[in-house]
Structures are given as C-alpha cells and as structure tokens.
Image (spheres, rainbow, N blue to C red):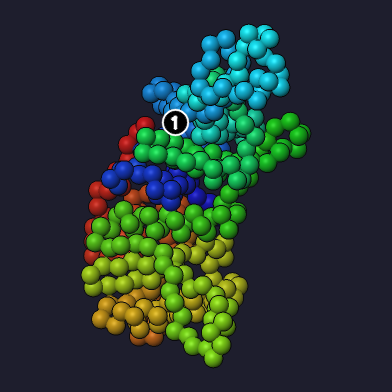
Amino acid sequence: MSIPVRNIYFLLLYAWGHFKSGTVREVGSDQSPDLPNLLAKVLNVGSHRLLRRGLDRGYIEVTEETRSPRGKLRLDVMAKQQTMLRGLAVCDLDELTADVLHNQILKASLLALSACSDVEKPLRHELQETARRMSGVAPIRLSAGIFRRVQLSRNTAQYGFLLRVCELVFHALMPDDNGGGSKFQDILEDETRMSALFEDFLRNFYRAELPGYSATSEIMSWSAEAEDMSNLAYLPIMKTDITLRSSQRTIVTDAKYYREILAGGRYDPKVRSAHLYQLTTYLAHVRETEPLKEISGILIYPASTQSLRLKYRLLGAPVTVATVDLSAEWQQIHSELIALIEPGVQPSQNSKIRKA
C-alpha cells in the first residue's frame, strides 16, 4: 500500500491525539521524501523547541561525598569507607537536573536516527548537533518497556507527541547489512501495527471532527447463559473498534487494515465473511440494548487503488462496506470520512494546516 508521507503524518497526529482544536501543525512533511526523514525532522524540530524554552528538569536522588553536608547523611557508608578520615561526609540528596527519563529517551532517539542510513546525510548531522546540545542528558539504551515508565504531567505534555515518535522509531529501526548503522523498516507492511494505528486514527478523527457524536471503543457483554457459570469466562471479549453515538443514532464502525480488502481472489471477489459476522454480532447487541436508536454499521478499509461503496441491510440495519483512499489529498480523505457518517454535511474548516 502506498501512502504519501504527508498523509502518514496526519494519521499519526490524529491517532496519537496531538492536534489542537482541529488544526494540525505541519513540520515540513511536503519536503520530506519518506517516513524516516519526516520523523527525523519532526524530532529535530521538536527538540529545538524544547531546547529554546529549556528542557524539563526533575529531581533525582544522588549520593555524593562532600565537605559541606546537605541532605541525608549516610552514616553507614561513612563508617564503612572511613570518609571522615579524609574530612568528607557522604550524603543522599535530591538534585534538580535535566537528566530525566523523557529527555534521555529523546536524546537516544536523536542519536539512533543519526546513524540511520535512510536519513539524508545533512539531516543526520543536524540530529547529532541537536543531541550534542543536550549535554547534561545521558543517552540510554532504549527498550520496549522503557517507554511505559515515562510519566508526563501537564507541564511536560509537549513531550507526548515526540515520545510517541521516539517509540515508533525504536520499533522501526533495525541493523543495516554492514552492522555499523541502522535502516528503517517499512511500517506500512506491518499489518498488526498499522491496524492499531488506523483504528486509533479513525476514532480520534471522528471524536474531533464530528462534535455531535461521541466516539469510543467499548466492550459489549454477551447475551449468554450457562449451567456452569464458570463457562462464561471462556467466551471471547466482544470489543468494538469505534462506536459512534449521537442523541438519535448509534453507528458501529470496524476499522480493517488489510493489504487485500476482499477475499476470493481476482475473479470471485467477496466481502470477508468473518468481518461481516463480527459486525452483525455487534449490531444485534446494540439493537437489543438500544431499541429506540437508529442503528447502522460500517466496515472501513484503507485503500490507495481500489474504491468500494457497498450498501446492504443486515438484521434490518443499514451496513456500508467502504474504502478511504489514503493516497488522495488530505481534504478529500477528510470529506470521505465525514460523508460516511453524515452524507449531507459539508467539510468543516477543522482540517486547516499550519506550517511549523
């Protein structure tokens, strides 16, 4: 699947919830030839902003030998090491420093991208220079679990998007053939990661662009009974990708990121039965729990070549199987997604783009 890098950037902005009042900020996405260079530029520009305003600082506990005691005296260490013979005390104290986890991750990611052969050489040099300016921050060895340890506050919210970029970069980089650097994997070919990204994008897009609707992912309970109640624990979780609700309507929306949208091959294309079964199960549950609402369902697939708008009635509810062309201009994507829910609504001005 081919998606322009500019559109990938917008997908990330919505998926990660980093747009403000419907206005997205563009960071040279038109000038970036591909995703590695775009992410490198985003990290570089974002890091410069943080450096201009001053890196966030936090308190960390340090132990030091000093002739001027402060903090908590470590009498046990002093006795063991006999520091008093040298006129020194050992103290534990809290030190205010920029050498905190979110800055360490940012610096490590800048250095990792600066060694990526897919990033243009001038930009790699800029990344190294930006990392060098973070002189009081120690680069750390990144791991999948380290991102979950980050705790941001309202005062450090500006790190949120950058750290999501860092995490994506961490998972996408792999050693190059020479073993001395790295190269970038094509995340568009990773259906598992892109499925989650596409689902988050749609949910946050509708949450932002359709103010008359709520957009949530919800767990539905099975209308099931069993003689042995413990058997109910073996039923699978029934969780919608996106449930859109207004005062009068409930729309169950399933986001499906598949390289091949239809089953059956070239000569006998069919909508995937498992997808329809799943959607109709959700619709049956909604009809039972919300009998007075107007119920409908939508299967949405991303596509860059194949266009579908199939309409049915299943279990008495309107069902649409549709694609959204992610290779199109962003305003067209915006309009297509709005029209799936509210066909008569003109595109809002919420998708304005600001240059960074």
Q: Which residue is mark 1?
A: 46
Judged left or right of residue 38, residue 85 is: right
**Which residue lies at the image location 33% right of the left edge and 50% below the top edge?**
331
Q: How many marks?
A: 1
Where is 218 relative to 315, above or below?
A: above
**Which residue lies at the image location 68% right of the left edge and 36% below the top edge?**
182
Q: Nearer the viewer, residue 84 or 2?
A: 84
Mark 1 surroundings within 10 Å by alpha-carbon count, few (fewer than 14), some (14 through 19), many (20 or more) = some
Name the image quarter holding the N terminus: bottom right
* Residue 352: percent from left, percent from top: 29, 43
* Residue 143: percent from left, percent from top: 63, 42
Q: Quadrant of residue 286?
A: bottom left
* Residue 6: percent from left, percent from top: 44, 43
Name the image quarter holding the C terminus: top left
Q: Nearer the viewer, residue 282 or 185?
A: 282
Where is 174 relative to 254, above or below?
A: above
